[in-house]
Amino acid sequence: MQNTTEEQLTGIQEQDTELMEVNERKWKAEFLKFIENKNRLAQKYMQMEEDLLHPIRKIGTYGKIWIGFLVAVTLAGIYAYYLQETRSKYETISIRDYTMWGVYISTFVFYVALSMVGALMSAILKLIKFEWYRPLSRIAELIALASIIMAGLCIMVAMGRPDRLHYLILYAKIQSPVTWDVIVIATYVAVSLLMLLVPILPCMKICEERLEDKPVWQKWLYSKLSFGWKGTPEQWKLLKKSIKILAILIIPLAVAIQTVDAWLFATTLRAEWDSTNFGVYFISGACLLASAAMIVAVYAFRKLYHFEKYLTDKHFDYMGKMLVFLSLCYFYTNVNEYLVPSYKMSGLHANHLLDLFTQDTAPLYWMVAVFGIIVPSFLPMLRSMRKPLPLTIIALLAVVAAWFKRYLIVIPGLSHPYLPIQDVPESWTQYSPSMVEMTIVTATFAALLLIITMFSRFVPIISIWQVAEGEGVDIQEIHEPLNKKKI
């Protein structure tokens, strides 16, 4: 009996030993797999850094020519503005008592609509956790900020007397829609700036550490713009919380700025603008423009900076589907905007609608309707049309049509006042922008592209840490050795 018990104990001990050996082997295998996976992710992250920092390391010949061209066009616009302010307005611009708003206000409305891209393609996608937003967010936020800055400049140019600009604040009246616009634009600029700058703090630190060959002043700038970023868990937590708060704030602000922009027109006594649908009409048009502009920008960065690995066909497929949805929404608001007045055809509404549909502005109106609404509504429904190149062509047509659409909102609406002016020259009833006006407007587009270009040459246009996080890389662990080494 005793021998049997000893044999059982021996057998149990042997089983325990075998079990421990098996567990040890499993643990070692899992540990080695963990280390291997961690090393793989670290290598993947380092490759991401190299790819996304590459456009910053050196500006090629074509890049310098492009920047020089944009600077030249911007300077030409500044000179044109100098001529406008130092010479007679009757000689330099075509704005008259009939058409007191011209291409400056058309372009202002275009830029305000374009600034919707930050809320649409960054904030909303972040909040609903669509992971494909990650490579797109910074592009969208940059376009939004640059656009709203250009919108403010267009207003300044249109006002004349820049020396009285501060009167907008000193003598503001809250019952004026212009005051509403000043308030909402200033707030939107501030939030858009934070929306762009807060997420780049880790990237500034990465640039400071990785771009060793850059001039001292540039590394100093990276150091200052990182605002003491160390990558501690507390900083990461605060960063992500701040981004979420800003994303929540910017959505109602984007809706507000489009709505107030619409109210500027709707509260002015003109037949075309006498609409309670104008707020939704402007918002839907802004969403369409934002999605189309984003497609064009993503394609440009993908080709010029060789970001095919990060801006993939999948992104264009998703953006194409979004373009279709938003185009159909805009299609609906256009039907809503024109169907009822065209059904009644009464008074000045009839004059305006006939002008749009069959008379002077009909070719431009139907061009906008086809390329700005119908084409982006239906062509991207085909899978082959959601490939990068064809989708970009469709989106580019929609962007150009969007500018002309704002022109059609502003100019024909002013041509049909309720009380026509008597005994004025015939030329006053027709508006055609002067060379000075078109030079200034062209310069604002050049300045917009210059801001985007220069930013992308100093800061990674695709957020390194956000893309890495989407790939499962623990960014805090990756940078922890660097932080310790730095300390």
Image (tube, rainbow, N blue to C red):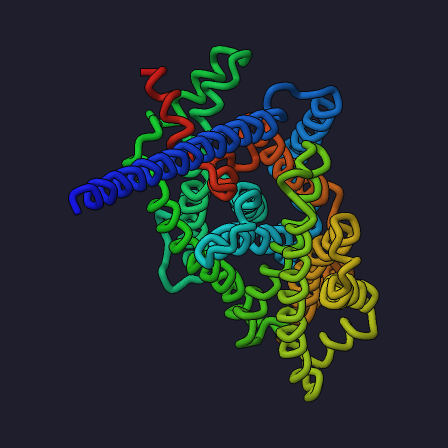
Question: Can residue 178 be seen here?
Answer: no
| Foreground of the two, 426 or 342 | 342
> Which residue is drawn at the image coordinates 39% and 46% (left, top)?
243
> Which residue is drawn at the image coordinates 64% and 75% (left, top)?
332
Q: Position of residue 314 (x, y in %)?
A: 66, 51
Query: Against 19, is 183 above or below?
Result: below
Hey, which residue is sitting farthest left in the picture?
A: 2
Which of the image's four quarters has the C terminus?
A: top left
Q: Position of residue 420 (x, y in %)?
A: 66, 71
Position of 288 compared to 483: left or right? right
> Which residue is drawn at the image coordinates 34% and 40% (left, top)?
19
Query: Against 176, is 41 above or below?
Result: above
Position of 400 compared to 189: left or right? right
Position of 203 compared to 48: left or right? left
Q: Where is residue 397 in the image (x, y as percent from the top left)?
A: 76, 55
Q: Position of residue 254 (x, y in %)?
A: 47, 57
Residue 3: image quadrant is top left
Question: Can residue 235 be seen here?
Answer: yes
Query: Against 321, is 66 above or below?
Result: above
| Foreground of the two, 330 or 223 | 223
> Which residue is drawn at the image coordinates 65% and 38% (left, top)?
309
